Image (cartoon, rainbow, N blue to C red):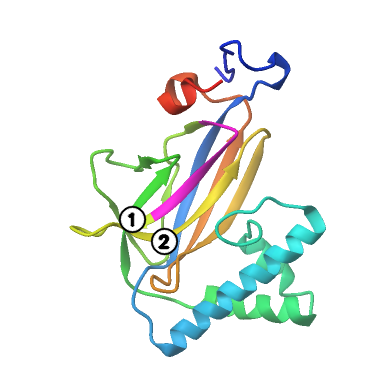
Amino acid sequence: MGEVKCCGGCPTNTLPTIDRLTITEIRCHKPASGMDSSAMAAFAAFGGAVATVAQVAVATAGTVASGGVAAPVTFAMIATAAGTGGAVGSAALKALNVINDKFSGADDLIVMVGGRKVVSTNPAAKFQSLDADQSIYNLAPISFVGRTRLNLLEYDHPSDDDDMGFLDIVGGQNKAVMQQIIMGPESEGNIYFISYTVEKGAGSVQTIGPKWSARC
């Protein structure tokens, strides 16, 4: 487990590890739904705050781009920024106001990781219904090499499923991320918090799928 066997075309000292991703919580804060003008303004302000905090994160720590914004942003980062004052603090306070709001409704949620559907309870289900302020916990671990992408989709039949945002997860080191923010486009208006762990070298070649097992 945790090792990639080389086919002869890559230097042995650059072999990547097979890492294990465990999604510990997916929480729906605001489901995808139609929005009136005031809700659209609040959603736009929230997105602006996330982007502003992301830019600060890049400037101070060089974090990796993800989720359609400049860097991964968590609830804790928003809360910390809200106490800093200035333009960043003002933007973060607006985001906290949205986080403190209560929303209603539900999503027919599809979770994709590395192009594969991940369901917490019934693998045969087309989607999982998730209400506002409801969470699903401890999805089955997923093995990946280098980096992988988590996509959120809203089930929509017979048309294409609706995009509700994504985040890129980078391997190569052990880490635990709490409540990273995913936002969908304005047409959906959803806000989710994703918590996950990455364990370097703890993945299994049997579970990374043919597109990775054949990769050198």
Badge 1 amino acid? Leu
Q: Which of the two marks, 1 or 2, is nearer to us in this view?
A: 2
| In the depicted structure, whether residue 73 falls above or below residue 14 | below
Which is more toward the observer, 75 or 8?
8
Residue sitting at x 41%, y 54%: 152
Q: Which residue is mark 1?
A: 109
Residue sitting at x 44%, y 74%: 186
| In the depicted structure, whether residue 24 falls above or below residue 192 | above
Badge 2 amino acid? Met
Residue 9 in the image: x percent, y percent? 61, 15
Cβ–Cβ under 8 Å for marks 1 and 2: yes
Residue sitting at x 68%, y 63%: 54
Q: Which residue is mark 2?
A: 164
Is residue 108 covered in magenta?
no
Give the Cα distance between marks 1 and 2: 9 Å
Residue 78 in the image: x percent, y percent? 66, 68
Instruction: Identify the residue at the far front of this view.
Output: 9
* Secondary structure found at label 1: strand
Residue sitting at x 79%, y 54%: 61
Q: Quadrant of the C terminus?
A: top right
| In the depicted structure, whether residue 107 falls above or below residue 37 | above
Residue 158 in the image: x percent, y percent? 18, 58
Q: Quadrant of residue 131?
A: bottom left
Q: Is residue 76 left or right of residue 202?
A: right
Instruction: Identify the residue at the far left of this view.
Output: 158
Q: Main secondary structure of the magenta part?
A: strand
Q: How many residues crowd around disc 2 within 10 Å: few (fewer than 14), some, or many (20 or more)?
A: many
Q: How many residues crowd around disc 1 within 10 Å: few (fewer than 14), some, or many (20 or more)?
A: many
Residue 93: tell me if it is visible: yes
Which is more toward the observer, 23 or 100?
23
The span shown in magenta is: 144-152
